[in-house]
Amino acid sequence: MINVKSETGKLKKVLLHRPGFELEQLTPEALESLLFDDIPYLKVAKKEHDKFSQTLRENDVEVIYLSNLMAETLNISDEIKRNFINDFIASSDNSIAHTYKKELISYLLDYENNHDLVLALMEGIKANQFEKKEKNPLCSLLNDSRTSFALDPIPNLYFTRDSFATIGNGVSINHMYSKTRRRETIFGSYIFKYHNDYKNTPLYYTNKTPHNIEGGDILNISNELLLIGLSQRTSPEAVEKLASSLFNDETSEIKKIIALDIPNIRAYMHLDTVFTQVDLNKFVIHPNILDNLRLFIITPSKKNIQVIEYFNGLKLLLKELLHRDDIQLISCGGNDYIASAREQWNDGSNTLCIEPGKAIVYDRNIITNRILHEYGIETLEIPSSELSRGRGGPRCMSMPLFREE
């Protein structure tokens, strides 16, 4: 069962993906297309991620791994396994996968252990890993290259926040902004269709919807209030579609959505890279977005939805919506422009609140972490020299499945 109706309720169950060999498949020429700025050192990235998992468990959070959940789904039947493989290949834009589809399917079906199959698909399948009937001499020569993939690696998987988003007791399976990340959503599609623990979860959005939206832009502020970023990765059309779906679904409690239009740049790729909640009345924010931030209130109407622009600023809006006079916006990096820009880039604004006033943060953001302490926030610091190279922090790396209300 899914239950996520806030950003601060005590976290009880969370979905993670431990970085795997897919990071070892990164090459300098592929960094831009695979959305990385540098190549993480996998050995250290695993240690850092294990510390993240350990910190969660030490705070009574049950950790579930994506690969295990997907393998359990495939174990249900051979038909599900075959359909999953077909869908996975169909979603690839790699010509080798389609040219040798029959041979590739046969190779993947030969995996007896479904967990090994899932990891292999995450890591990428090279063209020389399976036998191919010669289509023509040129294809044969080119596709024998040791660097040619039939199915590309998926190195962004350890950011489990994005491919689907939990909202209340339901889920939004997202249409990802970048083609290289769209295969990530297939895992969620099958889990929420077939897995015994999650197959009856209401779906408020699906990856078949043409407009792009990602989970890092979706913040559950209360059971009735959602904040969504209009960002590099989430379009206005998707927000309207999700709003309409939520307002018209009897399983949803959402009564109001606030859309925050943030600068459309890579540094601010999602709302949670510049704004997260760390306590019932406290939010950490990158101060550089405030001057140009546009706010829109979305509510149901007889025709569909109503959108009104709000001009009095984010702090006043949060006071009104949360019925609190003590709202505090904590600046990432403080009042120092350089520190703010540097620590936002290193995910100082991207915190994971695990209960009111307690949040997991990257240890490298020393100024922001010190300021959070001054505001009474207990910070659980995790190492981040390699994980941060993927441009994502603790919130990005976690998808809550259950929070206490």
Image (tube, grey):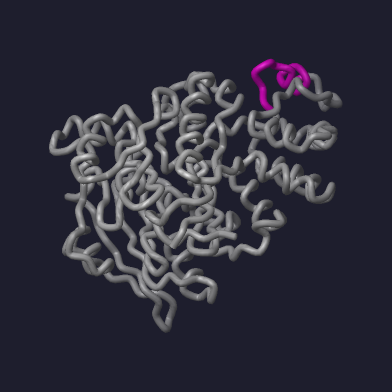
Residue 96 in magenta stretch: no
Q: Residue at x 76, y 22 (%)?
A: 129
Residue 269 position, x and y percent, is 37, 42
Q: Is residue 311 visible?
A: no
Query: Is residue 69 positioned above or below 5 on the image?
Result: above
Residue 157 position, x and y percent, is 55, 37
Q: Is residue 122 left or right of residue 301?
A: right
The segment highlighted magenta reads: 138-149
Residue 140 in magenta stretch: yes
Query: Is residue 357 positioned above or below 6 on the image?
Result: above
Residue toward you, 27 or 256: 256
Q: Quadrant of the C terminus?
A: bottom left
Q: Residue at x 46, y 72 (%)?
A: 253
Query: Is residue 372 positioned above or below 152 on the image?
Result: below
Q: Is residue 187 visible?
A: yes
Q: Is residue 202 left or right of residue 49?
A: right
Q: Residue at x 64, y 33 (%)?
A: 122
Residue 211 position, x and y percent, is 50, 56
